[in-house]
Amino acid sequence: MPIHKSVELNTGAEMPVIGLGTWKSPPGAVEKAVEVALKAGYHHIDTAAAYRNEREVGHGIKASGVPREEIFLTTKLDNPDQRNPEAALEASLKALDTPYLDLWLMHWPAPMTTDGKADKGHNWLDTWKAMEKLFQAHPDKLRAIGVSNVSKKFLEELLAIAEVVPAVNQIELHPSCNQQELVEFCVSKGISVTAYSPLGSDASPLLSNPVVEKLAQRHGVSPANILVSLQANRPGVTVLPKSVTPERIINNLKLVDLTDEEIQELFEIEKTAHFRACHPAWTGWGSIGFPDCE
Ligand code: A2P
């Protein structure tokens, strides 16, 4: 399966296949990381209100000198803001110091209170309706809307009431969490998929997995390149390697074509070594429809 350079969203916009992930990138380091990435050739940056680094991401964009229109910028509606999406959108635009977002995602289908509990009095589907209204009313501020951490079961509920089909579902994807059925379901509905934690997040065992190392040697690249490439070889999928280390940020741009057999070999890893870097239970909403989280 050859790699792709970008994915066409259901809005017609092109989303670059590799974006810089910034989950767990501290405000002090993320500005430099964004600047380095954009100067090195990234055209896609992913952040979230919940990461508490939007302001520094905005500074990094400015410091890079890369024009805003050459960058695909994503941020996300935080769970405690689901009752006030309009105010949250304005706050994100202000923090990022940008007139518009290329993509605005509902971070989790899990409304929460500001003290970190499930907000059981609010339905996430109502949040989607409010996001649709904002999208329709403000095309100057929102180029596309989508979701994150949404299972097939929950997506079916969403699609039953949606007027706007989400452009993207951003989910955890790596060889210990392939979610192939969900990826295929999304793509069949015109929803592109973005892979977060493609390396398996911090201290990942995947970087020293024997299959990953073997393929890295075969292709003359690093294990991280194999893990990022795996997602870039899946049709309809974009991928967000996170790093605050300049050499790694630059190295992670290198993609290789993987054969179907190599992809299968990587998918097999999950059979004996399944894990999630981010289990949805932290939201107080249980498995939110993910079969492996029940
Ligand atoms: P750091 O940010 O300190 O460079 P994921 O993208 O799956 O969330 O993984 C992020 C983790 O992987 C971070 O701990 C990051 O460290 C590390 N990382 C990113 N790129 C590489 C790389 N090329 N080689 C090794 N580790 C990496």
Image (cartoon, helix red, strand yellow):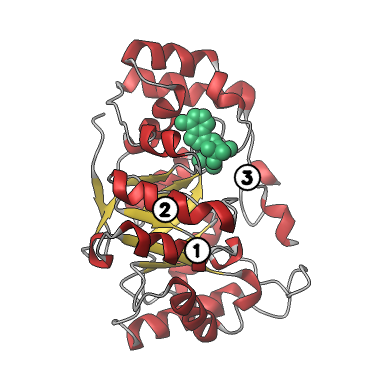
**Mark 1 and mark 2 residues within 8 Å of each other at the beta carbon:** yes
Which residue is disc 1 drawn over?
56
Specify the label residue 291 is tagged with. 3
Q: Height in image: 163 above or below 169?
A: below
* Residue 36 image position (x, y, % from top left): 38, 47
User: Mark 2 or mark 1, which is nearer the start of the sequence?
Assistant: 2
139 vs 55, nearest the viewer: 55
| Residue type marked 3 | Pro
- Please give left or right for residue 204 compared with residue 61 in the image: right
Seen from the viewer's position, the closer of residues 194 and 33 is 33
- Measured Cα–Cα span from mark 1 to mark 2: 9 Å
Badge 3: residue crowd in 10 Å (few <14, some 14–19, many ≥20) = few
Q: Quadrant of residue 113?
A: bottom right
Give the quadrant of residue 165. bottom left
Res. 199 visible in picture = no
Question: What percent of the width, then of the height, locates residue 161?
Answer: 46, 75
